[in-house]
Image (cartoon, rainbow, N blue to C red):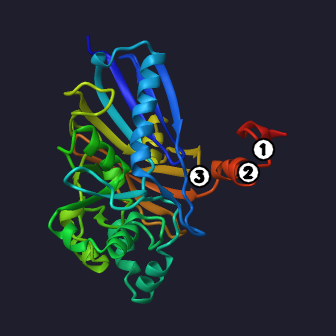
Amino acid sequence: MKNLIIAIDQGTTGTTVLVLDNELSVLGRANQEFSQHFPSPGWVEHDPNEILTSVSEALASALAQADADPSAIACIGITNQRETVVAWEKSGGTPIHRALVWQDRRTADICDRLKSEGVEPKFRAKTGLLLDPYFSGTKIKWLLDETQTRQRAASGDVICGTIDSFLVWHLTGGAKHVTDVSNACRTLLMNIHDLCWDDELLKILDIPKAMLPQIKSSSEVYGYTKNFPGLPDGIPVSGMAGDQQSALFGQACFAPGEAKCTYGTGCFVLMNTGDTPVQSTHGLLTSIGWSIDGKVTYVLEGSAFVAGAAVQWLRDGLGIIKTAPDIEA
C-alpha cells in the first residue's frame, strides 16, 4: 500500500528528509550536512553533486529509521533554499560551475551598475524585489559571463534553475525542467502579476529564456521519479515551495494579515497579504507565497541574512565552540 509521503527540505547547510504517514505523523527524519565553499570574501558556493548525494543519503537514513520500504512511497514534496542557483548541461546533468548560494555577494557590482542605469524601479514594479546580489537573476548573468556559455544556453544545451528545479530534473531522470511560482518570484526574472518570465528583464540581464524552467503552481504533479538512487521509478513529485513560503503555509498562515518568523541560517518574517501584491514603502519585499488550484497568495517579507549562520561560524570558522548548543553558556 502506497501510504508514505516524503518531504525533502534542501537547506543551506544540509538536507533534511521526513517520512510521514497519511495522517502526517513523522515516522523517520534524517539530516545530512554538506560543505560550504568560500573561494573569496563574500562568495559562497555549494557543490551541486554533493547536494544530490546529501538528498539520497538523508532519504536512505530516514526510510531506514521509519523501517519503510521505498515501494510504499505515494508522493514526494520539496522545499528548498530559494535564491541559490545552478546551471547544468541538459545532456547528462553535469553542473557547469558550483552553485551560487543566496548569501553570495559577488554580483554587487552588476547590481550597482544596473541601479546607476536607472532600471531598479522597473524590477521593483514587475518582481516586487530590489536589485540585490541576494536574488538569482544577477547570479545567472555572472555564471553565463564567467563560463562563456550564453550561446549554449540560448540553444537550450545549458539550462539553469534554483535548487527545486535542479532536484526535480534529477529526480525525474532529466525529464522535467520546472519550478514553482514561490521560487520563480525570487529570481528577478518573473513578473509577479502575470506569473511569466519577463522578456524585458531577461533582455536587461542578457539571460536566454530557453535555459529557464517552466513555471508551475506549488501543488501539482510535475513528473515521476526515474533512475534516482534509492527510489523506485514512477513516484509522483507533486509539491514545491521555497523554504520561507512553505514555513508560512506550514504554520497555517492562510488568512491575510497572518505572519510567521522562522529562525534558521537566517531569520525571515513573512506576512500573508491575500490575493493582492502589496508594495512596501519600508524596504520589505513583495513575493508570492504559493499558487494552488489557480489561486495565487502574495506575501510581504523582511529578511535578516545571518542567524544560525553565526552559530555555524562560531563552530566551524572561529572554532570556539564544539557543538551549536555550546553558545548557550
**Which residue occupies 73% across, 51% down?**
314
Mark 1 to mark 3 CA distance (whole Å): 20 Å
Looking at the rendered structure, the kind of residue marked 2 is Leu
Residue 256 visible within the image: no
Front in this rendered view, residue 237 or 276: 237
What is the quadrant of the C terminus in the image? top right
Q: For mark 3, does the 10 Å Cα neighbourhood hold few (<14), some (14 to 19), or many (20 or more) residues?
A: some
What is the quadrant of the N terminus in the image? top left
Q: Position of residue 233 (x, y in %)?
A: 21, 27
Q: Which residue is mark 2?
A: 314
**Which residue occupies 43% across, 41% down?**
246
Pointer 2 or 1: first along the chain: 2
Q: Which residue is mark 1?
A: 321
Front in this rendered view, residue 236 or 182: 236
Q: Which residue is mark 3?
A: 266
Mark 2 touching mark 1, by CB under 8 A? yes
Discs 1/3, front: 1
Pointer 1 or 3: first along the chain: 3
